[in-house]
Image (cartoon, coloured by chain):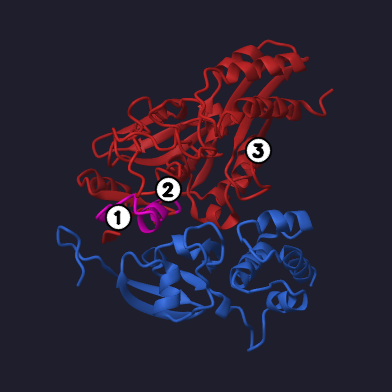
Chain colours: A red, B blue
Amino acid sequence: MQAFQYIRANDVASAVTLVSGDPGAQYLAGGTTQVDLMLKDGILEPDRLVDITRLPLRSISRDGDVLSVGALATMEELAADVTVGERLPFIREALLASASTQLRNMATIGGNLLQRTRCRYFRDPLVAACNKRAPGSGCAAISGAARMHAILGASEHCIALHASDLCVPLVALDAVAHIEGADAQRSVPLTQFYTVPGDRPHVETVLKHGELLTAIDIPLLPLGTRSGYLKVRDRASYEFALTSAAVALTIDDGVIADARVALGGVGTIPWRAPEAEAVLRGAAVGAQVFLAAADAAVHDPFTVPGTAFKVELAKRTLVRTLETVMEGSA
Amino acid sequence: MPETTRGASTEVDVTLRVNGSVRPMRIDSRVTLLDALRDQLHLTGTKKGCDQGACGACTVLADGKRVLSCLTLAAQCDGRAVTTIEGLSRDGGLHPLQQAFIRHDGFQCGFCTPGQIMSAVALLAEGRAGSDEEIREFMSGNICRCGAYPNIVAAIREAAEM
């Protein structure tokens, strides 16, 4: 692996200036993606690494009906937050279903949003064909051993999955990312933050080189909203999702007044399902409407033999989540 | 001295506080906490298993929190307190969790054991040993390929009840 210069940033502005002005520089936060891809896989080769872990971007604070989360808060810290437990329970469920305690103590919320795909072909420098790593080189996963891959937002160019659990309820909630650039600050809703790969899989988000994710704002669920996150995986714990679903329903006298739905384990980006929300909104709670919502959510999938099972599994996962969220209701 | 392609130094001065001792060192920026502990400080109790964040054998405590030393750069730990398996003994005697692992035969080959015990020390501090189910869930980041899980759970349960 290429040698690099290690610099510890003392304030946000100098960190952003340093990385923005240097194409060979990258940020280092919790390191669970960055160190892995640099030291172990040899995929990332910065010659300057700017450690941002001591910047003051770690607070979690509530302002009215919004929870503001510093990008350097860890996954364990966010999972332990009282407001998350009371008003965003499916965020807590998604966090505690992720990785292991050791990794959650290291991994930051900003890093979770910006994690790179687990596609084994992307992570193996000996594989030549990877449009995400080497634009125009093809996709080895299409004809390879695909299982932990995407079926929504995917194409013959790329089927790499965005594997975050946390991002699934976050996109359902319309969370907003705050971004610090060398010249300006901006805010982008998470539903517009990720870019579907199309024929440019190497572009994953709207971030420009050097822009730093500093915080996310998470709108709290209205009181009385039912929410749930269900993760289906190959082993009971410490495993990525095959499929998952995040659901929040506001019920008014047996009718679904509002619905938020997103899917994990199936999308090239964290996958909001507005079509399913449209089916649910205004409908009476019931098995048929849940099935219709699942059909609407998983539309136009792009599958390869290894991922074809996910079409039905994703639908069943959503139906199960909707049923679980409604369990115990009068 | 090693340099990057444009001539910047790739070495870094780091002071770790390991098991209560202040340990200054000058290292290549690529050195992980795991390699610093094992190769620089000769604390070989912390094991290198997968070396890629998947097995938990390298688990240590950093400022009291359990982390994977294989995915942590040593440079990031400058000034931080690190506790390894060598730092658990009290007054020359074994830590209660170490004793419980022996009593319950919580290992076979023993390679994952230091990571299991460091993870379990943190688990107890986190208050997550309320049931066997909870212990299994929150120990899931530590893989034992010998399959000693039932005895590991029994050892942790006993230590939690002490």
User: What amino acid does circle 1 point to?
Assistant: Leu
Query: For mark 1, what is the residue?
Result: A49
Question: Label 2 lies in what chain?
Answer: A
Tell me the residue that label 3 is attached to: A232
Q: Quadrant of the C terminus of chain A?
A: top right
Name which residue lies at 48% across and 76% down.
B18
Q: Within the magenta stretch, is there residue A39?
A: yes
Q: CA distance from mark 1 to mark 3?
A: 36 Å
**Quarter of the figure with residue A114:** top left
Q: Which residue is mark 2?
A: A57
Task: Say which of A294 and B10 sits in front.
Answer: A294
Circle 2 SS class: loop
The image shows residue A125, relative to residue B152, as above or below, that is: above
Give the vertical position of A33 relative to A261 (above or below).
below
Percent x, y for residue A250?
A: 69, 21
In percent of width and height, residue B140 lies at 65, 56
